[in-house]
Image (tube, helix red, strand yellow):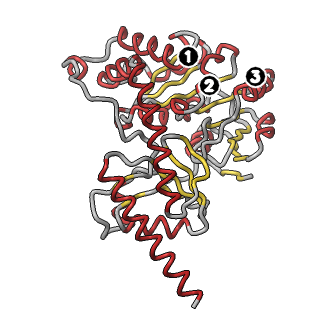
């Protein structure tokens, strides 16, 4: 159990190439950035209407986005969907829907939820026992979990939500990776029961993280409260257009899930060839537990391959998916070099 005092310092994230250059100044570039869980095969670019940039976003397009998002995520209606410029912006606002009190985060997980709850005035504790969440005023579950891919079943979450709601509490379920998770475990269709907020990220699955688009799915009164905080132009015109098109493109989504599953299996096999155990994850990232995780992180970093490491968990790494063929080749070469040095060291010890 870990207690966080106040709004903790900014949390280190994956995806910072500036930080990578500082850590590995002599690494070959460009970096193969496997430190995020962002799809390397982004939704196809298309020509935007000029008005997406030259005019303020129209309310009608915002409604269109809510309609298509409700259909894509299984929300009861468009009135249950609040769009925002990324779920990062939503986190402290959603946490503030519960009066300041006891916030429990099911961990270990994405540290931004803890920071956001502290900003909202909660006393925040990370717990590893799901049952402990029943004692919270605000309970937060990431499902599928980052970084290990853990899944909490829908029925367990609904039972928890009922207990919390009965005494004025709130359950927040971050489903940022549910696009590649078991879709039947999503709570998006259950939010009208009250006391539930589901977060969905657009940029990760569609590979367009820089677009900044995310959604809160909740009962209609909660959605109205959130939208009132943002005002009329929360989502930029280009994000509206990409969100409307991509979320409606079910054919692309089905094919991409198939492709990602194949890439994840390929990555597992590659790691396995060099004795790196994959312990979980989703098809957008793989979860590695290794005694010498720091050594692997450094060895690959020196070769321009960036994984995600966790300062508080020295035996854990997370690896996103390589994109095109050259990135796979560079990863294979770097792993082979690391494994050879490891084996040479073992032989030297034996002598």
Left or right of 216, for residue 36: left
Q: Is residue 17 left or right of residue 263?
A: left
Q: Residue at x 70, y 51 (%)?
A: 3
Q: Secondary structure at mark 1?
A: loop
Q: Are marks 2 and 1 in contact (CB under 8 Å)?
A: yes
Q: Is residue 252 above or below residue 106?
A: above
Q: Nearer the viewer, residue 312 or 272?
A: 272
Q: Which residue is mark 3?
A: 165
Q: Are marks 2 and 3 in contact (CB under 8 Å)?
A: no
Task: Give the quadrant of residue 135.
Answer: top right
Nearest-to-viewer mark from 2 and 3: 2
Residue corresponding to mark 2:
186
At label 3, counting other C-alpha atoms closer than 10 Å, the crowd grade (few under 14, some 14-19, many 20 or more) is some
Q: In whole angstroms, how far apart are the C-alphas of marks 2 and 1?
A: 8 Å
Given residues 230 and 141, the one toward you in this image is: 141
**What residue would you read off at disc 1?**
74
Q: Quadrant of residue 54?
A: top left
Q: Position of residue 213 (x, y in %)?
A: 41, 29
Earlier residue among tags 2 and 3: 3
On-image quarter of the C terminus: bottom right
């Amino acid at each position: 159990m870990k207690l966080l005092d106040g709004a903790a310092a900014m949390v280190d994230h994956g995806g910072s190439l500036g930080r990578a250059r500082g850590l590995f100044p002599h690494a070959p570039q460009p970096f193969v950035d496997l430190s995020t869980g962002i799809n390397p095969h982004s939704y196809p670019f298309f020509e935007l209407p000029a008005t997406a940039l030259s005019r303020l976003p129209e309310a009608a397009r915002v409604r269109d986005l809510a309609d298509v998002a409700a259909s894509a995520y299984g929300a009861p209606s468009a009135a249950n969907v609040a769009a925002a410029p990324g779920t990062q912006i939503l986190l402290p606002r959603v946490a503030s829907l519960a009066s300041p009190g006891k916030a429990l985060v099911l961990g270990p997980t994405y540290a931004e939820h803890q920071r956001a709850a502290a900003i909202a005035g909660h006393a925040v504790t990370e717990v590893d026992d799901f049952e402990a969440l029943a004692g919270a005023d605000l309970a937060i579950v990431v499902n599928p979990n980052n970084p290990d891919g853990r899944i909490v079943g829908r029925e367990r979450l609904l039972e928890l939500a009922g207990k919390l709601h009965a005494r004025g509490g709130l359950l927040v379920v971050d489903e940022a990776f549910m696009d590649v998770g078991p879709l039947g475990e999503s709570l998006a269709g259950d939010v009208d029961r009250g006391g539930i907020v589901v977060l969905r990220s657009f940029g990760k699955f569609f590979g367009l993280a820089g677009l900044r688009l995310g959604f809160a799915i909740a009962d209609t009164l909660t959605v109205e409260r959130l939208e009132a905080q943002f005002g009329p132009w929360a989502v930029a015109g280009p994000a509206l257009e990409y969100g409307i098109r991509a979320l409606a493109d079910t054919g692309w989504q089905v094919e991409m899930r198939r492709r990602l599953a194949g890439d994840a299996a390929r990555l597992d096999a590659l790691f396995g060839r060099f004795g790196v155990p994959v312990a979980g994850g989703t098809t957008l990232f793989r979860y590695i537990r290794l005694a010498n995780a720091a050594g692997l992180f450094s060895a690959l970093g020196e070769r321009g391959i960036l994984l995600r490491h966790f300062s508080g968990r020295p035996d854990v790494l997370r690896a996103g998916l390589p994109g095109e063929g050259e990135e796979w080749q560079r990863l294979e070469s770097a792993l082979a070099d690391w494994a050879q040095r490891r084996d040479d060291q073992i032989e030297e010890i034996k002598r």
